Image: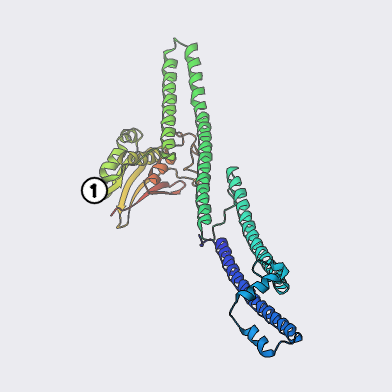
């Protein structure tokens, strides 16, 4: 309890007050002893003077003043003149004066000590009340959602440990509020993006359906616009699946099951659905790397990320082009590179390519919905890796995935 500075100061005050009270009462006792001595001497002087006036011999007076024996005759004489044990103290002149002076001194002493104790206690509780009011205002601001102020925590003691706990709770509430706000903004943005991206294929589907309805007997038209409807539906399916995957990654609902996998098998899995497309488009996929290399990752998700990078390379490479998937291993890192000799990325676009639905003005005629690169980035970074890009317009682009080597 005395770790609290204010309580420690108050305890020090009480200790000093006790020392002061002991000193004052010692002074009071000394004053009583001195006064009693003076009263006894004064009474003896008065008795000796009265006896001398009555002609009593000095030897008899000296014997009377220095004697300690009490006789029944002497006690009876004192009772007769109202100086016995039953006499009131206020009727005894010297004792009356002694009591009056001591009562005045004692009352003053008690008043002084009481005033000091009262003022010290008031100052302690006043400082304590200021601290409580300050804490109450800050806690109320926490309740109102304002976390700019902080409870005092620069001292020791139970109260300040309580303040530290409340501050920790406020930090948790602030983090929770920020998370909820970010979640709401994320859902708002996601819904807006999906709505915006679905408008185009839905409008195309509606238009194709009207054309087919107007020309049900035109086989060529039916065949042409059925194909376009299928492409639009495929685009919508890709969009919805990609958005669901990104949303699950961003909200932390995906737990990556990371294990050691042979890298050639991982690359082969990534290209399984793209080899035929590359052949049909007249583009060549090249693979180069150590066949014994392994990567500690989630095979399914990592294959999808690499596949998205290869898809992006195919989208921006003309017929006769080359897409090379290579990897190299160092003691500290394993790097996978997907490079092409396609159109490249303009300098003003390279800082935006990982944004959702971002489409450069130079690539509006290519397929895709603008989610492949953001999805790949979320997958790689979700497993502790890094993704970087280098590109020269007209010469090609190279995406590099970097993973720390597991011990």
Which class describes the residues within 10 Å of circle 1: few (<14), some (14-19), or many (20+)? few
Q: Which residue is mark 1?
A: 291
Answer above or below: position of 192 versus 146.
Answer: above
Residue projecting furthest to the top? 217
The front one of 367 and 377 is 377
Residue projecting furthest to the left? 292
The front one of 227 and 380 is 380
Secondary-structure class at tag 1: loop
The front one of 376 and 161 is 161
The front one of 358 and 344 is 358
- Asked if residue 317 shows in the view, the reply is no
Residue projecting furthest to the front? 73
The picture places residue 126, in percent across and down from the top left corner, at 64, 57
Q: How many marks?
A: 1
The picture places residue 111, in percent across and down from the top left corner, at 68, 64
Which quadrant, please, contains the C terminus? bottom left
What is the image's colouring?
Answer: rainbow
Q: Residue at x 44, y 43 (%)?
A: 343
The picture places residue 131, in percent across and down from the top left corner, at 61, 55
- Asked if residue 278 shows in the view, the reply is yes
The part of the image, by quadrant, that contains residue 57 is bottom right
The picture places residue 216, in percent across and down from the top left corner, at 45, 10
Left or right of 349 in this view: 98: right
Answer above or below: position of 291 versus 224.
Answer: below
């Amino acid at each position: 309890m005395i770790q609290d500075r204010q309580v420690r100061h108050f305890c020090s005050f009480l200790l000093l007050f006790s020392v002061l009270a002991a000193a004052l009462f010692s002074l009071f006792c000394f004053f009583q002893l001195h006064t009693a001595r003076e009263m006894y001497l004064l009474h003896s002087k008065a008795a000796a003077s009265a006896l001398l006036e009555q002609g009593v011999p000095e030897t008899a007076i000296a014997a009377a003043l220095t004697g300690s024996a009490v006789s029944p005759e002497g006690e009876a004489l004192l009772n007769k003149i109202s100086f016995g044990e039953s006499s009131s103290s206020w009727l005894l002149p010297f004792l009356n004066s002694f009591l009056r002076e001591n009562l005045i001194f004692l009352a003053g002493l008690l008043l002084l000590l009481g005033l000091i104790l009262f003022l010290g206690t008031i100052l302690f509780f006043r400082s304590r009340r200021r601290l409580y009011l300050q804490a109450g205002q800050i806690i109320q601001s926490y309740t109102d959602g304002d976390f700019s102020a902080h409870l005092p925590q620069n001292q020791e003691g139970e109260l300040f440990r309580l303040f530290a706990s409340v501050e920790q709770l406020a930090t948790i509430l602030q983090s929770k509020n920020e998370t909820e706000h970010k979640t709401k903004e994320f859902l708002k943005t996601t819904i807006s993006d999906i709505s915006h991206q679905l408008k185009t294929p839905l409008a195309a589907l509606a238009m194709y359906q009207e054309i087919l309805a107007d020309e049900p007997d035109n086989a060529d038209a039916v065949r042409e616009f059925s194909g376009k409807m299928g492409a639009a539906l495929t685009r919508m399916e890709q969009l919805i699946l990609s958005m669901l995957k990104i949303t699950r990654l961003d909200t932390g609902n995906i737990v990556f099951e990371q294990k050691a996998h042979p890298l050639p098998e991982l690359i082969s899995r990534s290209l399984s659905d793209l080899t035929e497309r590359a052949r049909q488009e007249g583009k060549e996929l090249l693979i180069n790397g150590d066949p014994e290399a392994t990567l500690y990752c989630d095979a399914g998700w990592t294959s999808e990320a690499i596949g998205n990078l290869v898809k992006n390379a195919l989208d921006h490479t003309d017929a006769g082009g080359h897409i090379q998937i290579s990897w190299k291993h160092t003691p500290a890192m394993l790097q996978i590179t997907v490079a092409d000799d396609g159109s490249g990325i303009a300098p003003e676009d390279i800082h935006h390519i990982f944004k959702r639905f971002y489409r450069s003005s130079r690539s509006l005629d290519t397929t895709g919905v603008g989610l492949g690169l953001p999805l790949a980035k979320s997958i790689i970074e979700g497993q502790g890796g890094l993704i970087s890009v280098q590109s020269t317009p007209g010469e090609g682009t190279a995406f590099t995935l970097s993973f720390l080597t597991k011990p």
